[in-house]
Amino acid sequence: VKPTVIDVDIYVNSIGPVSSINMEYQIDIFFAQTWTDSRLRFNSTMKILTLNSNMVGLIWIPDTIFRNSKTAEAHWITTPNQLLRIWNDGKILYTLRLTINAECQLQLHNFPMDEHSCPLIFSSYGYPKEEMIYRWRKNSVEAADQKSWRLYQFDFMGLRNTSEIVKTSAGDYVVMTIYFDLSRRMGYFTIQTYIPCILTVVLSWVSFWIKKDATPARTALGITTVLTMTTLSTIARKSLPRVSYVTAMDLFVTVCFLFVFAALMEYATLNYYSSCRKPNCTKKKKSVRWEHLNIFSCAAQETCQTVTFFFSPQNYSVLDMRPPATVITLNNAMYWQDFEDACVYECLDGKDCQSFFCCYEECKSGSWRRGRIHIDILELDSYSRVFFPTSFLLFNLVYWVGYLYL
């Protein structure tokens, strides 16, 4: 027994919308099937017999199913959108209009610069290839004018139709597939996500030009930009399903967040290292008595110099820094009225520097400081004005070239 041959023709009326969250798309088609049933041959002067939809249930029709459809419905307004024609040689044409919500597994690694091929798959439900064969009536599938399509975020790149044999435990089935190639438009996401993220990162750099003593201003700016990036990240994720991998937009938003957070941490680092941090430092005014000792140094009898050392009689240690500006001389002794300025950076003792860095200008000299990288922490803002914009520009260059052209 020869298998029944079903010639299939599809006219695409419209496509869209495409839902990235639900991984589905909607399509409106006219689905036509043509086959021959010798039992329906008739002798008449009429070559074609046109019947209404009530006759559909009285003859045999293919048990075609759409394998990747989630929901599907036929149109019934104002009358059932079905057409049944029978030729005198037994040839049958059966067409109907369908709206199908079909599954499309979107790969969102390159989102929102992604491209997809959404399939529409159909085959027989119970007849294997030994009993029924599908074949395309035409080489290509026709489509209506795209102006009425509701793709919104996508551009229609084209379509292609294929056929294959799928082996199952119940038999081998002929499976027909139409692929709709779609490319996502970036306009919406550029306005809603990319531009706000870039402007927020640039705004965080403004703190590098604000003097370091303006703690409230710089802190408020840093916290505001961090919270703004958090909000933008949340909004960007609303248009995506909860996939486990990182998308292109996730990468961009995360890097922008790190730049904003790093700008805030930059000021925290600057403020910490540029402030007084010695444990015995106090902001209370107290008098400290400094004794001084004059020593005469003579290179020759005619040329002598007097070197004055200041020391504290409490701990008998020589002060290795200049005496304070506010000094009161009384009975061969000097009293310092403001002890707040007497704080000495711990870095001078070599106790608080990192393994490979020396953070202060005074740390350049000394045997223990040899081989270390000298960074003036007080110039951190100057470094950041160059480092942050340059690194962000390089990141954007690599990001856009990598995702758009590679």
Image (spheres, rainbow, N blue to C red):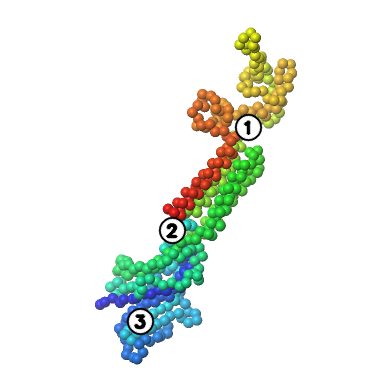
Task: Please tell me in which quadrant of the rendered image residue 29 appears.
Answer: bottom left
* Residue type (three-letter) at the residue carrying disc 1: Cys
For mark 2, what is the residue?
107
Residue 283: percent from left, percent from top: 68, 31
Q: Determine whether label 2 and label 1 are within 8 Å by CB.
A: no
**Most extreme residue toward the front, as rendered?**
302
* Left or right: residue 237 compared with residue 305: left
Q: Is residue 197 above or below residue 339?
A: below
Towards the viewer: 114 or 310:
114
Task: Give the residue number, with chain letter if any, for mark 1.
Answer: 276
Three-letter code, disc 3: Ile
In the picture provided, is 348 more to the left or to the right than 65? right
As rendered, which of 156 and 340 lies closer to the eye?
Answer: 156
3 or 1: mark nearer the eye: 3
Label 1 sits on a secondary structure element that is loop
Q: Secondary structure at mark 2?
A: loop
Residue at 29 percent across and 74 percent down: it is 131
